[in-house]
Image (cartoon, grey):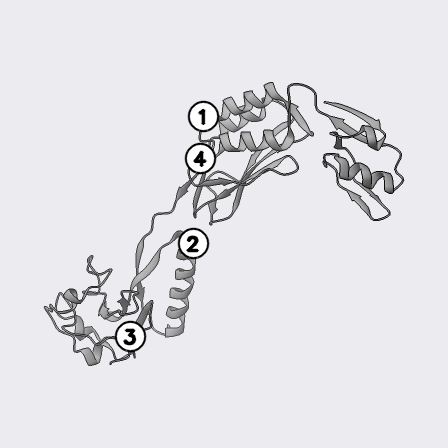
């Protein structure tokens, strides 16, 4: 790559080294000079401009950055188009960032003009988070250096990948101590749900236990469908039925220990999607299984 000052008419094909602003003209650093730029420079009265010219065997900054970034990216990683010599890598899903530190060091040792930077290893990330970037420092890099960097990345691929969160169903058991108010429990459930959300997890059962160890209440889950039915999720204070999601009408017609529909829907009609919460006394769980024989659809209670 060579640098030099040229008259605008002789600078075609060169890359602008310094941003130019004059009489309404704005020509940013890194712009490739074409006929339109030559005309604008002449109209602005600029007699000479410094540009960089690629030599045979050179690879432009954007081309090199994009090629190396594609070789670096692994599962769950998206590479955006390169600009100004930089190609950014983003998380396609929520999860934990996994990087190959030794391979990244080897890539960064290929040429001082080529750099790869990432977030810390095992950093928790959400969808759309930028997790790494490849940067070509000058306007171009030698083709040989670019090829070596790509070879290092492909030999150890993936250098950067996402270990996606596994969707989990979570049960929360709260101990009711003397003086503990319901709003504290409610806040704990809300905050816990917010923390679980990025991992795709959700609370499906929440049980409050009194100091004596007897269940005080449970959360009632729904199918999440517009024609959903409601069903107590907790079979007992400590056992939640595995086959509870999605809920089918057949599951609602068989009952081993019946909780009357009126009591089960005492908290009001279930929302169109999500869960509704109600308190059920410990006596409702005296048997090993609690279910409802026939529950009304939301709004029919």
Task: Tell us which disc is closer to us: 1 or 3.
Answer: 1
Q: Image height check: is 144 above or below 160? A: above
256 and 78: which one is in front?
Answer: 78
**How far is the residue under mark 2 from the one under mark 1?**
29 Å
Position of residue 206 measured from the top left corner of the image (x, y, whole percent): 30, 65
Mark 2 element type: helix
Quarter the C terminus occupies = bottom left
User: Left of 152 or right of it: where is 64?
Assistant: right
Q: Earlier in the sequence, mark 2 or mark 3?
A: 2
* Residue displayed at 38% across by 47% down: 165
Q: Which residue is mark 3?
A: 278
Circle 2 residues within 10 Å: few <14, some 14–19, many ≥20: some
User: Left of 114 or right of it: where is 212?
Assistant: left
* Residue displayed at 30% across by 74% down: 270
Circle 1 residues within 10 Å: few <14, some 14–19, many ≥20: some
**How far is the residue under mark 1 from the one under mark 3?**
54 Å
Q: Earlier in the sequence, mark 1 or mark 3?
A: 1
Mark 4 element type: loop
Q: Which residue is mark 4?
A: 74
**How far is the residue under mark 3 from the one under mark 4?**
46 Å
Q: Image height check: is 269 above or below 274? A: below
**How far is the residue under mark 4 from the one under mark 2?**
21 Å
Q: Which residue is mark 2?
A: 198
Q: Which residue is mark 1?
A: 156
Position of residue 130 measured from the top left corner of the image (x, y, whole percent): 54, 44
Q: Image height check: is 18 above or below 299? A: above
When asked about the image quadrant of residue 67, the answer is top right
Q: Image height check: is 217 above or below 168? A: below
* Residue displayed at 62% across by 36% down: 86
208 and 191: which one is in front?
Answer: 191
């Amino acid at each position: 790559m060579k640098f030099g000052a040229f008259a605008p008419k002789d600078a075609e094909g060169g890359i602008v080294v310094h941003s130019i602003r004059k009489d309404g003209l704005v020509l940013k650093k890194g712009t490739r000079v074409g006929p339109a730029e030559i005309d604008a420079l002449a109209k602005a009265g600029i007699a000479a401009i410094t540009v960089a010219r690629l030599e045979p065997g050179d690879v432009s900054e954007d081309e090199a950055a994009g090629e190396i970034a594609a070789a670096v990216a692994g599962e769950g990683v998206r590479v955006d188009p390169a600009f100004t010599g930089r190609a950014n890598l983003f998380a396609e899903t929520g999860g934990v960032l996994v990087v190959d530190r030794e391979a990244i060091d080897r890539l960064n040792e290929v040429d001082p003009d080529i750099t790869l930077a990432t977030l810390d290893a095992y950093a928790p990330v959400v969808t759309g988070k930028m997790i790494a970037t490849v940067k070509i420092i000058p306007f171009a890099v030698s083709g040989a250096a670019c090829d070596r960097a790509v070879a290092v990345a492909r030999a150890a691929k993936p250098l950067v990948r996402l270990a996606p969160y596994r969707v989990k169903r979570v049960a929360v058991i709260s101990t009711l101590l003397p003086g503990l108010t319901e709003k504290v429990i409610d806040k704990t459930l809300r905050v816990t749900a917010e923390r679980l959300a990025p991992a795709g997890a959700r609370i499906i059962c929440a049980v409050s236990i009194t100091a004596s160890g007897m269940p005080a209440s449970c959360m009632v889950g729904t199918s999440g469908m517009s024609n959903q039915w409601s069903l107590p999720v907790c079979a007992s204070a400590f056992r939640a039925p595995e086959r509870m999601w999605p809920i089918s009408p057949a599951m609602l017609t068989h009952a081993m220990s019946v909780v009357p529909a009126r009591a089960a829907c005492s908290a009001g009609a279930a929302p169109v999607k999500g869960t509704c919460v109600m308190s059920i006394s410990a006596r409702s769980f005296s048997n090993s299984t609690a279910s409802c024989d026939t529950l009304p659809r939301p709004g029919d209670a």
